[in-house]
Amino acid sequence: MSKIQTTFLRLKSENKKALIPFVTSGDPHPNMTVKMLHTLVESGADMIELGIPFSDPMADGPVIQRASERAIANNVGIKKTIKLVKEFRKKDINTPIILMGYANPIEAIGIKNFVSLIKDAEVDGVITVDYPPEESKDFVKLLKQQDIDSIFLLSPTTDDNRIELITEQATGFLYYVSLKGVTGSANIDINQVSERVSNISKYSDLPIAVGFGVRDAETAKQVALISDAVVIGSRIINEVENSNQEDLLENIRTLMTEMKNAIS
């Protein structure tokens, strides 16, 4: 059983929901990434999504696009991201780390090589935004062989046939994109999200995380009532973008504590 699965089981036994923050590897600078990851855990993160910088992040809004641009300017890609995870693991072997990225860089280094590298770094799950289930069977198989979870996105436009296809391959949890469009682009319609999460749960017993539009503590609280996990992305990257290096960690800690209290 993966650390992701174990974490969700523990939280369920405690009647709690997971808080999953997202940050981009190498943003604002590679020497801050590991410090940020530890700060996220210290202030309430149950697992962490770590974005692999990519030049054409089509699912991401302007805030996370700029984070990728800054990271790429710092020469951070897949291999540097994996090195940063290994550095994080020197002090934290328990918090699940989920890499989130796009197929192109993975294909460039080869899926077998990628899976081998992330296994060595003790990565727990992978979200590949533009790997549809029809084209990722070999990749998913390799991940499963290494006990690494394959996490798929579902959206408001995902029909029931496709939900069934995705849930046949997914492990760890399902990630429901709460709105049409890119990350951070609109306010969440909680009633609509509730209906969609309820429908998805008919096809799978996997936990369901909701993200792409959680901007404040009140929204996080509402999302936690209808899902198993709340993903916070653009809101954290806003803090990264608008904080100086001296205040960054404390600003992230304050935001995370507010979100954790809200969903608890």
Image: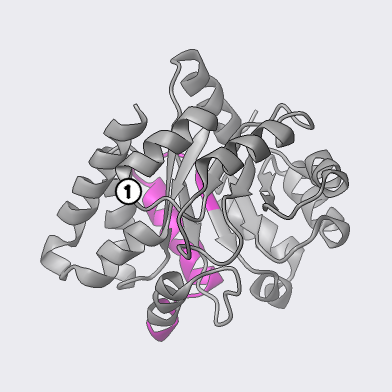
Q: How was the colour assigned to the protein in this rendering?
A: one colour
Q: Which residue is mark 1?
A: 216
In the rendered image, which quarter contains the N terminus? top right
Instruction: Find the residue positioned furthest to the bottom.
Output: 73
Q: Residue at x 32, y 48 (%)?
A: 216
Q: Quadrant of residue 203?
A: top right
What is the span of residues highlighted in magenta in the rendered image? 71-98
SS of the residue under disc 1: loop
Asked if residue 54 is positioned above or below residue 25 in the image, the reply reads below
Residue 75 is situated, as x and y percent measured from the top left of the image, at 43, 82
Say whether residue 27 is left or right of residue 111. left
- Examine the image and state in which quarter residue 220 appears: top left
Dividing the image into 4 quarters, which one contains the C terminus? top left
Residue under the point 15% across and 53% down:
250
Of residues 65 and 24, the one nearer the viewer is 65
Residue at image coords 54%, 50%: 98
Q: Is residue 123 left or right of residue 257?
A: right
Tell me, yes or no, whether the highlighted magenta stretch contains residue 90: yes
Say whether residue 9 is left or right of residue 253: right
x and y percentages locating residue 63 in the rendered image: 40, 72
Q: How many marks?
A: 1
Q: Is residue 121 visible?
A: no
Residue type indicated by callout 1 = Asp
Seen at 44% across and 76% down, the residue is: 62
Percent across and percent down for residue 4 are 56, 35
